[in-house]
Amino acid sequence: MTIEHLAVLGQILAAIENDTLALPALPDVALRLQKLIDDPNVAADEIVAALSGDALISAQLIKSANGAAFADKHPVNNVRGALSRLGYRQVRNLVIATTMSKMFRFGNPLLNRHLESVWEHSRRVAAVSYVLGARKPYLSPDQAMLGGLVSRIGTLPLCTFIETRQLSLNEEELQVLLDKYSAMVGGKLLGKWSFPEELINVATPRSETQAAGDNLSRADYADVAAVSDLLLKENAADIAWDSLAAVQRLGLSDEGCIEFMEHNAARIAEVSEMLGLTAAGSSSSPPAAESRSPFSASGTVAPRPAGKLDALLAWLKALLKR
């Protein structure tokens, strides 16, 4: 790694350590809707009014309300009909997904390519999370879906920092940086967006104690997102599912995990379509982010093998703390 690249990493680490990393704001329409839905006395007219001013969001909601999941129902042709069919929280999820998709677009080709891959994989995790979250009566499938959507949100402020400062990193260096530090800022971003603690935890790395299950008596949305991420791996059949605390808390068996995607393929495809993914689960771009999952088998952030770059990063962090 060159001196220039070390300086880049030093700037990013300093911004994280000093809490000066700029965090993007949640788009106004999503923020307004979130506040409305959190109000127990909100009227449907208020939500319809908040949504109707955005043509793109209105069109996406109507399209989702007429998707494969509702093929046996009469078509809807307005926002009110879509809201009635989808429900408040599902509409919130789709609005956040639509607005976030715009945020994951950058002018830098390397960043744009990476973020497109991350956003696609996040939506796939969200679709599986919706189905997996329905297994536990105390979990909300809609909330589990939202957890999946924001599970890798920490990549966004890091890439924003890199583009804004016009920093130079190659693909490998970018991947290492995001693998190591995106979870450090993901929770901060969701906190700024006024997300509940149960979803902030999805984007925040767990301690080893929590991963081992000592402090958790039942599954939460972080467990759902972590297991959903693992279920999407190509080598899912080779994972020792029975040994994972998150799997145990979700009440899944080794066989149940191996067969989960096949047994729930139709429902996952329906939810994927609602999130703008192809029903068949294919994509025009390779899901590179899937192969570089930030989760380890235990549901914690996966450690990277020690190497020269790790040593340099540790050295930089030590300098920043002096």
Image: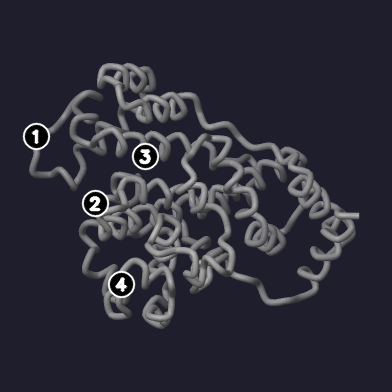
Q: Which of 189 and 161 is in front in this view?
A: 189
What's the amino acid at mark 3? Asn
Residue hosting label 1: 74
Residue at mark 2 to residue at mark 3: CA–CA distance: 15 Å
Does dot 2 land on a helix, a strand or a loop?
helix
In terms of sequence position, does the residue under pointer 2 or pointer 3 come before the other?
Answer: 3
Residue hosting label 3: 93
Residue hosting label 2: 270
What's the amino acid at mark 4? Leu
Provide residue 243's location: percent of width, then percent of height. Answer: 43, 80
Residue 268 seen in this snapshot: no
Provide residue 26's location: percent of width, then percent of height. Answer: 52, 32
Residue at mark 4 to residue at mark 2: CA–CA distance: 22 Å
Q: Which residue is drawn at the image coordinates 13% and 33% (left, top)?
A: 75
- Residue 252's tag is 4
Q: Which residue is drawn at the image coordinates 53% and 35% (left, top)?
A: 193
Label 3 environment density (alpha carbons within 10 Å; few <14, some 14–19, many ≥20) = many
User: Of tags 1 and 4, which is closer to the observer?
Assistant: 4
